[in-house]
Amino acid sequence: MKKGLLFTALTAIAAVSMAWAAETLWLHRADGITMGLPISKADSITVDASRQNVVIVGVDRSTTNIPRADLQRITMGDATNVVDITFAGADVTVVNPRAFEGVTVEKNGADVVVVAEDAADVVYRLSGATEDGSVSITSTDDFSLALNGVEITNADGAAIELKTERNVAVQLCEGTQSKLVDASTFAAVGGLNESACLYSEGSLTFTGGGALSITAGQKTALFSKRAVEVNGAAVSCVSSFADAISAGSFRMESGSVVAQGADSGSSINCTDGSFIINGGKLIAMAGNCTEPTEYACNQYYVLCTIPSVAKGAAITVKDEAGKETTGFIAVQDYADNTRLLISEPSLKVGSTYSIFAAGAKVATFEAVEGTASATWRAGEIEDVESTKKDFDYGEVKIGDYYYSDGSWSDGGFLGFDRTGNGKVLWASPKPAPTYTNPYTGAARKVIGIVYTTDLSRMGEAEKQALKEKGVKTPHGLVMASRVILAQWDNGLYDESGIGLSPIVGATPEDLYPTLNAIVSGYKVHKIMTENRKSEIAKGDYPVLNNLVSGAVDKYYGGPAADVKSTGWYVPAPAQMFDIIRNFSGLDYTENPEWYYPVTTTRFNWQRDKYLSFWTKYPENLIELINVTLSTLASTEKDDFPTGGDVNYMTSIFPSNDCYYCMPICEKYVSCEPIYKTNIQPVRFVLAF
C-alpha cells in the first residue's frame, strides 16, 4: 500500500467508533510479524506530526509508536488467542494477536524469541520448516504449544526452549508429523546452555492425534525440570549421546512413546523417581532403562537385559505363535547388557515373547502384570526367564537388599517350595549387593532386608505415615540387618495408662492367633514417642531413646533423612512371626500341629511337639534365616546366632512389667514374657 493510502486509512479508522468487541485490527509489519490490536483496547490510531510514525493510543491512554516505514498495511479480522509462527527456510512469519496484551515476539532470521507477561490462555502454533531456526518462549503463565507439522533443525542450540516453570500443554495437531533436531554443539544463550533438543523448565503434557520425533545432536532429546505426561500423542525421543528423556517424573496414560537413549545414558531418567504407565505403548532402550522408585506399570510389560545390538538393527518382539507384536530400529551401537522395556496392551501376562535383533533371536522373556505397588530398581531384574514366577517381576520382593538411600536390589528370592518342608528357593549363586547406586552414582550400604510385601501385614499407622510422605502405595517392610542391645525401660512405668493395655490369649490355644493378628508395631511406637516424650529424653526408655536420638540411624548408616519410610521401630509380635516364616519358609500358620500352647501368655513352635526341644528339625531354622544375610559384609550384619535361645524384643505387653519376646534357636521358636528391665537384642523394622 502507498504511504498516502495508508495515511488515509489511518485517519478514517481514527474517525470511527472503536466499539467492535469481538474484532481485531491487524498491523502487518514489513519484517513478517503481524500484531493484533483488539479494537476494544484502542482509542485512536494516527500519525505523528513528522508523518514518520504511526501512533496507537489505548483506552488506558498508553501510546505505542511504530515506524511508518515498517508498517505495510492494516486489516480487520476476528479475535483469537493463537500466536502463529510459520517457518519458511531461513525466515519466519509471525501473527501475534496478543501483541498489546503482554506477548512480545521478536525474530532474527528463523530464530524466534517470545516473552509473555501476564498473558494467560495463549496458544503458540508452530508450522513450516527450517534448517537453522529455533523457538524460545518465556512466560509467567501456563500456555499451550501446538505443533502443526513443524520441522525445526537448530544449528547452534535447542530447537525449542521453554524458559518457564509453568505448565505447558503440547498439542500434536491431528494427522501431522513434527520433527525437532538440535545442534551438535551448543552456544550459550543468555548465560544458559540448555543441552536438550526440547528443553523445558516446567511440566509438559503431550496430547493430540499427531506425532513428534525429537533427535538430540549433543545430549538429551527431551528435558523437563518437572513432569512429562503423554496422553494420546505419539512421541519418539532419540539420543546417541545421553538420556532420551530426562524429567522430574514421567506419566503415560495413552498414546505411544519410543525412548532410545545412549549406551551410557538412560531411556527415561526420572530425577524424582516417579514413573507411571497407565496405558498406551512404551518402548524404552538404553544402557540404563528407567528404574522407577514409587510407581510402576498398570498393564503388562517386559523388562529385560539383552546382548549388544548394532546401530540400524531391526528389533522385533514376537509372541509364541511367531507373530510380531512390537518393532523398532536401534539408533546406535549398544554394548552388552542393554536394557529394554516394552509395555503395551497387546502383551499377555504369562505368555513367552522372543526378542530378535537383526533377525537373530537374542532373548526370551515372559510378560508380567504390573500392579500399582510394583516398582523397579536398578539391578533388580537380569534374567526373568530363569526365575521361578512366585511373585510379580518388577515388584520389590522378599529377600531384596534395602539400602541406606532408600533404594533396593535383587536378593535372589525365587519363591517357596510348597511341595517339601516349606523352604525358600534362592537363586544360585545368590546375587550380591551393589554398593553404588547405578542411577545416582552415589555410594550406599545395606541396612536391611525386605521381609514382606504383603500389605495386609502392614499396620494402618504405617500406611498413613507413608501416605503423608507422598507414598501412594506402600511397598513392604524391612528387617534391619543388624541388632542393638537395650532395655525397654527402667521398670518405673505402666503403659496401660496411655492406652496400651496388656494382651493375653483367652485360652492357651488362642494366644498365637491373637498375636499373629497384631501388626501394630509402628502404632505402639507413635503412642510411646508422643506420650512418653520427656521420659524418653531422660533415658528412662533406652530402646526408644536410641531411636528418637538418631543413634540407631547412625549405627546402621541410614536410612537417609530424605528417604520415604516410617523410620525404624520395634516390631510387633506378628511382624517378628513374618520375619521367621518368610525367611525360613517354615509357615507355622499352615501347620497348626506345630503349635504347642503352654499358657495364655506363652507358646512354642516346634516341628514335633511330642519330641524334646533338643530334637532338631529336618531343617536348621537359624541356618535357613541366615541365608538372607549370607552375602553381606560383616560390618553390615548380625547373624541370628546358633547354639541357644536369643530373645528378640517386640512392642506388645502381656503385663505391666513385661513385654513379649521371641526366643529363636535352631530347633524351635517361642513367644513368652520377659522383664522390661532385661537387656535384649532388637531387630528393628521399617515400612516403605
Image (spheres, grey):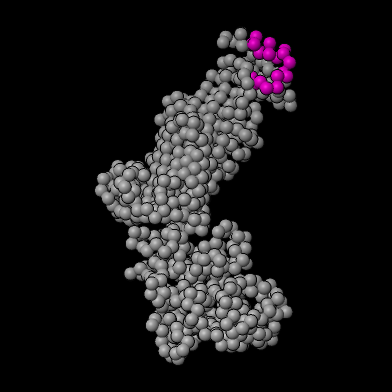
Residue at horizontal 31 percent and vertical 47 percent from the top: 321
Q: Does 405 lie within the magenta span? A: no
Q: Where is residue 362 in the image (x, y as percent from the top left)?
A: 28, 52
Q: Is residue 590 left or right of residue 500?
A: left
The relative height of residue 670 versus residue 200 in the rendered view (above or below) is below
The residue that appears at 70% across and 80% down in the rendered structure is 496
Hey, which quadrant is residue 422 in on the image?
bottom left
Which one is nearer the viewer's eye here, 410 or 220? 410
Instruction: Return the x and y of residue 504 as percentages of the image width and height.
Output: 63, 82
Quadrant of res 240: top left
607 versus 290 height, above or below: below
Residue closer to the observer: 27 or 612: 612
Quarter of the image containing the N terminus? top right
Magenta-drawn stretch contains 23: yes
Q: Does residue 242 appear anywhere in the picture?
A: no
Residue 219 location in percent, x, y?
Answer: 41, 45
Q: Quadrant of the C terminus?
A: bottom right
| 650 and 202: which is toward the camera | 650
The relative height of residue 138 versus residue 613 in the rendered view (above or below) is above
Q: Is residue 8 above or below residue 555?
A: above
Q: Can residue 51 be seen in this view?
A: yes
Residue at figure coordinates x 37%, y 55% from the top left = 366
Write down the region rendered in magenta: 7-25
Name of the residue lying farthest toward the left = 360
Residue 533, position as x, y percentages in the image = 69, 75
Quadrant in the rendering for residue 441: bottom left
Q: How many marks?
A: 0
Name which residue lies at 66% across and 78% down: 536
